[in-house]
């Protein structure tokens, strides 16, 4: 493994950063910081995509990197910031499970994902194959984050960060999906966030809060 | 070729047009017209495929074979009848003050957009596009589910969005893994996501990767199918949205999601030898059937009741597709058809019944047969049909599935027996007093649309007694494709 | 079907008709003796019947045709039964028309009619009697059938003459199962013929009666026929019992005139002894409450079943 | 000349469907529907019966319809077995249709046209069940039959009890149908769904047993075999009387048909212990049914319970036939089977007759409760006389038809000691005892039924206005009563005619009979000549009447009842239905769950009520309901309402599956 070329080492570094950011988001308490962390994740993603593009010379990966930069580093954080300002919510993030437990579960998840990814990575033709495990781990961590948050906005950020993990898997492990698909995915994410934005307002209008515990009425209780 | 473009173009154009004119008096007519055009185009496409065989078009990006073309026709048909139904239904809703002009515009536009995404998901050959279309379908319907802007509908839409979004994200991961496995064989270009290309090399795909990919795909698309324990969004979304949306969700969206799962299963079956996908799908299917059956007993809301029934039926189909083999696949395809038709018909009647009674609460809807025989008979016949009473078509497919299971998977039959029994007991216990007994309902400001109901039920009845040869041939070919 | 057969058939039926009231009178006589009373004349039942025939029939206003038809049907069924049971000879041509099961069927027919007739007038006692009669009947009838089944299994036939033939005219064998059957049969006969301990033929104490309660509304010729029919029933049961458990003296099926001639006094003697035994039982036991009847007939039924089991187990 | 039997039968079925459709179209024209369509339906029934009658002895005929599933068109076939049951359907159906022509009144219950449609669809579905020759056609017809009868049962759907009865009925019928379906699934093995290929498939003994018990459960549910009988006493009385008659008289027999078809025709061999189970279940149902019939206070419920009894007897007979067949004694099996077939036909006749009679009583009095009837023999002489025949027949009294089948069955029982299995030998006395006990109790029940309704004095003043049944109704009742008499008097002819059915089912026929005398094993073994018995009894009766009237006189004087001289007689002093059942309640107390309602001493109009409920509710059904509710609560926890929980479900599922893949 020592003979890895430089760009691969950089990508691995970025992968590690991505994972670290995912952990940071998992434990982050303030919603604005959460958005910043998300933007940072997007940046790491964009950079890694750019490096892959430079190395493999695939043009559409440059596009991907560009879209990522525009969407996940600029547009989405901006939208979220705006939303928070408009909704006037800057509260701390409440959570359902305390931080140490979350961390512990997160670590277990990482181990699990790495284990799962090992046999797959063996087969990969790409030099950055080890990143698949990291991508999977960050998807899992985002999932965990969604589970542990009880406010709407952090949950959405978790959702978006999961998208980041997926995107990372697509670019670093496979050198990118076909262009149409990536465009489609990006469009979906953007529209999704817009719709969610509309939703936040509607939810707040109805419930005077974005706390998800108001959204627990539909159930099969007694 | 041109047919494919027409099938996709009409709903897209309709969506665009209705986005501007959707609140006008003639919007429902436009909606119907667009749906009708789609239906005609899809029938043309069907005829073409029927005559010429499977079709690859537009640089292999679109692929039509008997399996999906029949779903296209079904989708277009139910889309059309639902559009017909929604005309009086939404007008009554408007009179009752539940929707305003802006929301009507949203409704009509999103309805067409939803049609478009469904058809796109069915027609595309690219698994990535399939994913994109599924996600887009979620987005379109989220807005439809929350149309009334009541707390409950917002809650339902939120859950729908988050659960399906997360679920479908897993499907994306699965798709990436598929791509990852195929890339070595097919190169990094666009070819590695084309189903036809993957199908060609499925024997050489790496089994480990494919089985992991299938887990992600199953969990992902399975969420949209409504498989237990991934189903939690489904009853909420069905119950709180407008009835036409419930009808298309149950009748179309679930089918398309299951279609995606089955497409993936075909690939996995080629690569992984030992019935891995089979076991998973049978397990999930059976679990869904059983859990949904027991949940049915607890329902107090009419639409929620039938939403759970959809889970049950999707479970049956998943089980049957999982079991595989020509008969079970045939039966599952037939079940898809009849379930779509029947369930949407039931939603139409339940919608009108709820409008008449002013509530969806089962206990407050009584004696439909006396005051509005059409709605009452529609509901009771539809319910009996969906519960698997012959001579309706649902029985035909359940007959085939159960008898095949008795041979191929006898261990599953006690569960099915119990589940079908409990489901019958639960659903019929709730519907019978709605239909029979002393009436509690009032008059509607507009004539209800009962024609789609009886057209659907008539078709289901026909499929129970006589399946047209071309349709049977179609099912057979599709069943062979699925393997 | 021989001339002797046909003759013995008619002889048997005629004898039964003639002897039936005599048996009733004899039992009443014995009871009186055993109770240290002076006995009524043995011919009293004949006189009663004749007197009743001469009277005008009084029928309730709301009696339906069933009420008036019943005495005849019951009488007919009993005569028919008497013709089936081989009391004198085993060659009874008519017995081929109805075997043991049909015999029980005929008894049941009589019972159902008499119960319906009792309900017809709509009096309290009539319906009470009908209910009790059917109650006793549903317990006694299966027991009787089971007794007959045991005998049928022994002889491999449900035809009464064949049974008697087997029991009386083949090599002597001891059938332990018949001992059980015999006890069961005795109990059933007591119940079926309205005897103590289930019913008291001499009482008109309303709350305890069964058979008499059903006849309350009858008078004159109808009553006479019913009284005669119940005497016939007693005789029939006695003859069944004698044929199954004491088949000695019954003539074989070979048209032997001498044997038939001998069979008549043998039958009379056996009936005399049987009647005395009945009187003895009635004297030494007490009438039970009606709801003790299951406690009496249940064991009879069980004994009959047991008899069959014993037969199957021992093969004899 | 070969008669196109299947053609005739098919024509009748089509005619029924057409009549139903016409009825649906002519919704409101009451006179046309009742006086025109129902008699036409009766004619179709007779055509069906004629075709079936010819088909019993003829070689099987079959046809394939271009309907059904693509690889499985509807196969139709008439062989001896189906022809026998078709005849039963045709005869009873025709009689009931004639009755219906006079029965359905304007402004009662549902629209006549709808009723007409459901009624004829019901008939057609039953006929289709009997001619179906593949699993799919059978199931479609089977469930269509259930559906049509369900709608007929719920004709008066505004009454909550009737809705409940209909629900229960359809539910149990549907679950039974799934069981039957699974039985077919088991039978088909690797072949297709036609009965022909099922016959060819040879399932292993284990699978054959599964198939048999699934079929027993499925058909038993429809037939009202214990413990799946609970719907029957609810649903049969709830329906209009002609429909009750069809359900009890004919529909239950289709279940018997199905059981026979699967057990003896489709399964290649039978295991002896199936017979023991069927025997035990059958006798238990018979005994249970008759005990409950004895304590009923509703006349139609009483008859419904009696149907359970009769079905029990039929299943017991089938069990006996299985035993004999499994032990290689086909002739004895044929005797038992003859008893079953005969009893099936008998029951169709007399149970229809009695249900129709209750229909007439219901129309005349608007009263179903036995406690408010009485003395109708004077007001309704026709119905009373014809019902008497039915009552005597169902009570198993010679010389009517009920006795014949009872006699045959007992004869069959008496041969069990020839079986090699000593365990079975020991069982038989008990079985025979249960059978005769049932028969004796049946007489009790029928005395109660007839005595309380028709005899005695009217218990309510309103009964004075009761009118006898009309011509149509009388004709139907008379036809059925005539059937009871004919079947009672000419058993040998009927049994000879049944030979092809027996040959088909058990591969043997009972010994040839004398035309006058029923002696399946030869005269020395046992014999019964109903005509002779009738002639002798009749001769004695006539002779006695003549002699008595000649020697003395025939004078009759009318007066008030005597009743031990008690002067203040009122109708309320008669035994009520409750009173009549009281000894049974007392003796069989452990079988009932009783609720007594004792009047207070100060009550001016005291009424004593007692309800005897079916303990199976508490033994099986309520626990099932509770278990379902419990499972529902458990499943309800899945739908917790909190999105985090839902996400956790997805997450855990994903992780579990991934771990499983590893």
Image (cartoon, grey):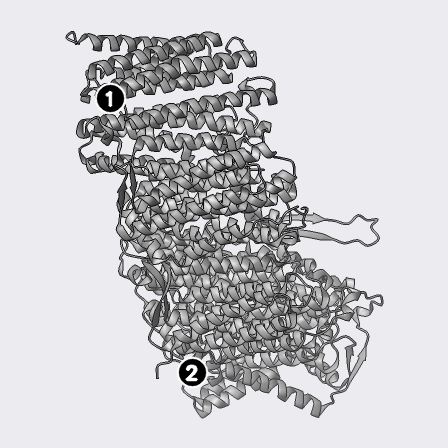
- Residue B106 lies left or right of residue B192; in this view the side is right
Using the image, determine if residue B42 lies above or below residue D125. Answer: above
Q: Residue at x 52, y 8 (%)?
A: A92
Which is nearer the eye, B53 or D433? B53
Secondary element type, mark 2: loop
Where residue A49 sits: x, y (%)?
Answer: 28, 15
Where residue C144 sits: x, y (%)?
Answer: 53, 67
Where residue D95 sits: x, y (%)?
Answer: 56, 74
* CA separation in Å, label 1 and label 2: 108 Å
Disc ID at residue D14: none
Q: Around disc 2, counting alpha carbons within 10 Å, would you say few (fewer than 14), some (14 to 19), or many (20 or more)?
A: some
Which is nearer the eye, D118 or D242? D118
Secondary element type, mark 1: helix
Q: How many marks?
A: 2
Which is nearer the eye, B430 or C195? B430
Q: Is residue D414 visible?
A: no
Using the image, determine if residue B10 lies above or below residue B155. Answer: below
Using the image, determine if residue C214 lies above or below residue D582. Answer: below
Which dot, 1 or 2, sits closer to the camera? 1
Residue that mark 1 sits on:
A174
Q: Is residue C224 visible?
A: yes
Q: Residue furthest left?
A: A3
Q: Around disc 1, counting alpha carbons within 10 Å, would you say few (fewer than 14), some (14 to 19), or many (20 or more)?
A: many
Residue that mark 2 sits on:
C252
């Amino acid at each position: 493994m020592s003979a890895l070329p430089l760009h691969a080492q950089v990508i691995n570094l970025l992968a590690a950063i991505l994972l670290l950011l995912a952990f940071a988001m998992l434990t982050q308490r303030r919603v604005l910081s959460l958005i910043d962390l998300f933007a940072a994740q997007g940046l790491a993603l964009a950079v890694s995509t750019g490096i892959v593009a430079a190395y493999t010379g695939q043009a559409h990966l440059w596009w991907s990197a560009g879209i990522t930069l525009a969407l996940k580093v600029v547009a989405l954080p901006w939208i979220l910031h705006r939303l928070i300002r408009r909704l006037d919510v800057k509260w701390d993030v409440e959570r359902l499970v305390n931080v140490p437990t979350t961390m512990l579960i997160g670590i277990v998840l990482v181990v699990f994902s790495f284990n799962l990814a090992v046999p797959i990575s063996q087969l990969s033709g790409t030099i950055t194959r080890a990143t698949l495990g990291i991508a999977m781990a960050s998807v899992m961590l985002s999932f965990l984050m969604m589970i542990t948050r009880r406010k709407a906005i952090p949950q959405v950020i978790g959702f978006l960060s999961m998208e980041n993990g997926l995107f990372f898997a697509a670019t670093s492990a496979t050198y990118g999906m076909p262009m149409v698909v990536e465009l489609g995915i990006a469009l979906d994410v953007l529209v999704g966030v817009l719709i969610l934005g509309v939703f936040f307002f509607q939810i707040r209008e109805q419930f005077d809060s974005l706390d998800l515990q108001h959204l627990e009425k539909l159930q099969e209780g007694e | 070729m041109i047919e494919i473009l027409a099938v996709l173009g009409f709903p897209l154009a309709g969506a665009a047009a209705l986005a501007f004119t959707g609140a006008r008096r003639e919007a429902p007519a436009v909606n119907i017209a667009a749906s009708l055009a789609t239906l005609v185009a899809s029938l043309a496409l069907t005829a073409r495929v029927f005559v010429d065989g499977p079709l690859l078009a537009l640089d292999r990006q679109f692929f039509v074979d008997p399996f999906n073309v029949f779903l296209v026709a079904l989708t277009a048909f139910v889309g059309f009848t639902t559009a017909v139904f929604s005309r009086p239904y939404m007008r009554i809703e408007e009179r009752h003050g539940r929707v305003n002009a802006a929301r009507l515009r949203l409704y009509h536009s999103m309805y067409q957009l939803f049609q478009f995404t469904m058809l796109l998901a069915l027609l595309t050959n690219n698994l990535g596009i399939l994913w994109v279309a599924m996600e887009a379908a979620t987005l379109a319907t989220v807005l439809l589910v929350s149309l009334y802007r009541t707390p409950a509908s917002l809650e339902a839409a939120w859950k729908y969005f988050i659960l399906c979004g997360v679920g479908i994200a897993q499907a994306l991961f699965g798709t990436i893994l598929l791509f990852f496995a195929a890339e070595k064989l097919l190169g990094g270009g666009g070819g590695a996501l084309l189903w036809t290309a993957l199908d060609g090399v499925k024997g050489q795909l790496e089994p480990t990767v494919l089985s992991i990919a299938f887990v992600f795909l199953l969990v992902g698309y399975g969420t949209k199918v409504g498989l237990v324990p991934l189903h939690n969004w489904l009853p909420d979304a069905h119950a709180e949205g407008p009835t036409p949306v419930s009808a298309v969700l149950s009748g179309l969206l679930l089918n398309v999601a299951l279609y995606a799962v089955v497409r993936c299963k075909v690939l996995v079956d080629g690569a992984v030898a030992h019935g891995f996908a089979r076991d998973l799908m049978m397990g999930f299917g059976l679990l869904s059937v059983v859990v949904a059956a027991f949940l049915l007993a607890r329902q107090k809301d009419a639409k929620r009741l039938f939403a759970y029934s959809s889970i049950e039926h999707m479970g049956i189909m998943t089980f049957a597709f999982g079991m595989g083999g020509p008969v079970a696949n045939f039966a599952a395809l037939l079940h898809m058809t009849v379930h779509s038709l029947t369930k949407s018909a039931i939603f139409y009647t339940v919608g009108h019944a709820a409008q008449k009674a002013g509530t969806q609460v089962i206990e407050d809807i009584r004696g439909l047969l006396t005051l509005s025989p059409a709605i009452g008979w529609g509901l009771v016949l539809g319910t009996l049909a969906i519960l698997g009473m012959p001579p309706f078509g649902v029985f035909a497919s359940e007959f085939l599935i159960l008898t095949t299971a008795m041979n191929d998977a006898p261990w599953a039959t006690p569960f099915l027996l119990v589940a079908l029994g409990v489901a019958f007991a639960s659903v019929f216990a709730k519907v019978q007093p709605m239909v029979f007994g002393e009436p509690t309902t009032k008059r509607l400001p507009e004539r209800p649309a009962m024609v789609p109901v009886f057209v659907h039920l008539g078709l289901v009845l026909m499929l129970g007694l006589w399946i047209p040869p071309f349709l049977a041939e179609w099912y057979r070919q599709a069943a062979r494709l699925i393997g | 079907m021989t001339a002797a057969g046909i003759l013995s058939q008619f002889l048997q039926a005629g004898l039964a008709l003639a002897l039936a009231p005599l048996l009733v009178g004899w039992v009443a006589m014995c009871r009186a003796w055993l109770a240290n009373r002076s006995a009524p004349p043995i011919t009293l039942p004949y006189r009663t019947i004749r007197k009743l025939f001469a009277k005008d029939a009084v029928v309730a206003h709301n009696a339906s045709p069933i009420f008036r038809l019943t005495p005849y049907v019951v009488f007919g069924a009993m005569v028919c039964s008497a013709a089936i049971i081989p009391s004198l000879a085993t060659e009874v041509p008519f017995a081929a028309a109805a075997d043991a099961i049909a015999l029980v069927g005929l008894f049941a027919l009589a019972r159902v009619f008499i119960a319906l007739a009792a309900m017809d007038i709509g009096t309290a006692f009539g319906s009470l009697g009908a209910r009790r009669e059917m109650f006793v009947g549903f317990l006694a009838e299966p027991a009787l059938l089971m007794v007959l089944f045991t005998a049928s299994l022994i002889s491999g036939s449900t035809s009464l003459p064949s049974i008697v033939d087997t029991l009386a005219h083949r090599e002597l064998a001891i059938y332990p199962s018949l001992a059980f059957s015999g006890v069961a049969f005795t109990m059933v006969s007591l119940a079926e013929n309205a005897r103590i301990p289930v019913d008291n033929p001499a009482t008109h104490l309303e709350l305890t009666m069964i058979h008499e309660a059903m006849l309350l509304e009858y008078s004159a010729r109808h009553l006479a026929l019913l009284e005669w029919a119940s005497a016939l029933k007693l005789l029939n049961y006695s003859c069944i019992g004698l044929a199954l458990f004491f088949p000695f003296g019954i003539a074989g099926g070979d048209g032997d005139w001498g044997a038939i001639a001998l069979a008549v006094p043998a039958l009379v003697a056996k009936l005399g002894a049987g009647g005395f035994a009945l009187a003895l039982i009635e004297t030494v036991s007490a009438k039970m409450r009606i709801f003790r009847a299951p406690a009496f007939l249940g064991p009879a039924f069980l004994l009959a079943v047991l008899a069959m089991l014993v037969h199957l187990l021992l093969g004899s | 000349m070969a008669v196109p039997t299947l053609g005739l039968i098919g024509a009748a079925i089509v005619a029924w469907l057409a009549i139903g459709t016409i009825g649906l179209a002519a919704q409101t024209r009451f006179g046309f529907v009742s006086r025109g369509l129902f008699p036409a339906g009766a004619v179709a029934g007779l055509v069906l019966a004629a075709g079936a009658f010819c088909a019993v002895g003829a070689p099987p005929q079959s046809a394939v319809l271009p309907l059904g599933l693509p690889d499985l068109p509807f196969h139709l076939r008439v062989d001896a077995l189906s022809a026998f049951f078709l005849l039963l359907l045709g005869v009873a159906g025709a009689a009931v249709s004639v009755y219906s022509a006079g029965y359905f009144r304007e402004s009662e219950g549902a629209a006549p046209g709808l009723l007409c449609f459901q009624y004829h669809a019901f008939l057609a579905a039953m006929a289709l069940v009997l001619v179906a020759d593949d699993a799919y056609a059978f199931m479609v017809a089977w469930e269509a039959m259930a559906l049509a009868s369900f709608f007929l049962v719920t004709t008066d759907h505004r009454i909550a009890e009737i809705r409940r009865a209909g629900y229960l009925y359809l539910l149990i019928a549907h679950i039974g149908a799934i069981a039957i379906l699974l039985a077919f699934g088991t039978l088909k093995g690797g072949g297709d769904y036609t009965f022909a290929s099922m016959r060819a498939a040879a399932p292993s003994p284990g699978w054959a047993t599964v198939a048999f018990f699934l079929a027993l459960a499925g058909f038993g549910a429809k037939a009202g075999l214990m413990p799946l009988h609970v719907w029957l006493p609810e649903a049969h009385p709830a329906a209009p009387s002609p429909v009750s008659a069809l359900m009890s008289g004919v529909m239950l027999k289709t279940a018997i048909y199905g059981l026979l078809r699967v057990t003896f025709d489709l399964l290649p061999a039978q295991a002896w212990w199936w017979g023991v189970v069927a025997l035990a279940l059958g006798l238990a149902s018979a005994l249970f049914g008759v005990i409950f019939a004895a304590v009923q206070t509703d006349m139609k419920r009483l008859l419904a319970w009696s149907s359970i009894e009769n079905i029990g007897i039929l299943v017991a007979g089938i069990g006996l036939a299985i035993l004999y067949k499994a032990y290689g004694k086909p002739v004895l099996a044929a005797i038992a089977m003859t008893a079953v077939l005969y009893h099936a036909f008998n029951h169709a006749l007399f149970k229809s007759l009695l249900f129709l009679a209750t229909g007439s009583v219901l129309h005349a009095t608007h009263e179903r409760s036995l406690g408010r009837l009485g003395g109708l023999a004077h007001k309704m002489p026709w119905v009373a006389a014809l019902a008497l025949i039915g009552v005597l027949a169902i009570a198993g009294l010679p010389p009517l038809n009920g006795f014949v089948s009872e006699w045959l069955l007992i004869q069959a029982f008496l041969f069990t000691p020839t079986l090699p299995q000593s365990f079975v030998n020991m069982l038989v006395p008990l079985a025979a005892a249960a059978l005769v006990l049932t028969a004796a109790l049946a007489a009790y029940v029928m005395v109660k039924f007839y005595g309380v309704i028709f005899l005695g004095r009217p218990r309510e003043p309103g009964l004075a206005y009761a009118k006898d049944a009309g011509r149509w109704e009388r004709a139907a009742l008379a036809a059925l009563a005539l059937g009871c008499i004919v079947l009672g008097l000419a058993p040998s002819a009927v049994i000879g005619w049944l030979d092809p059915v027996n040959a088909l089912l058990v591969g043997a026929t009972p010994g040839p009979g004398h035309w006058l005398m029923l002696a399946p094993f030869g005269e020395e073994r046992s014999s019964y000549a109903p005509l002779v018995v009738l002639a002798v009894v009749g001769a004695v009766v006539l002779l006695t009447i003549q002699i008595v009237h000649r020697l003395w006189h025939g004078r009759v004087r009318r007066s008030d009842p005597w009743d031990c001289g008690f002067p203040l007689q009122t109708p309320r002093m008669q035994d009520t239905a409750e009173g009549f059942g009281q000894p049974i309640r007392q003796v069989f107390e452990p079988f009932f769950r009783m609720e007594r309602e004792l009047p207070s001493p100060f009550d001016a109009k005291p009424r004593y009520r007692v309800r005897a409920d079916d303990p199976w509710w508490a033994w099986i059904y309520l626990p099932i309901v509770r278990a379902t509710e419990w499972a529902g609560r458990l499943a309800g926890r899945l739908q917790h309402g909190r999105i985090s929980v839902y996400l956790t479900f997805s997450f855990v599922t994903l992780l579990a599956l991934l771990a499983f893949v590893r």
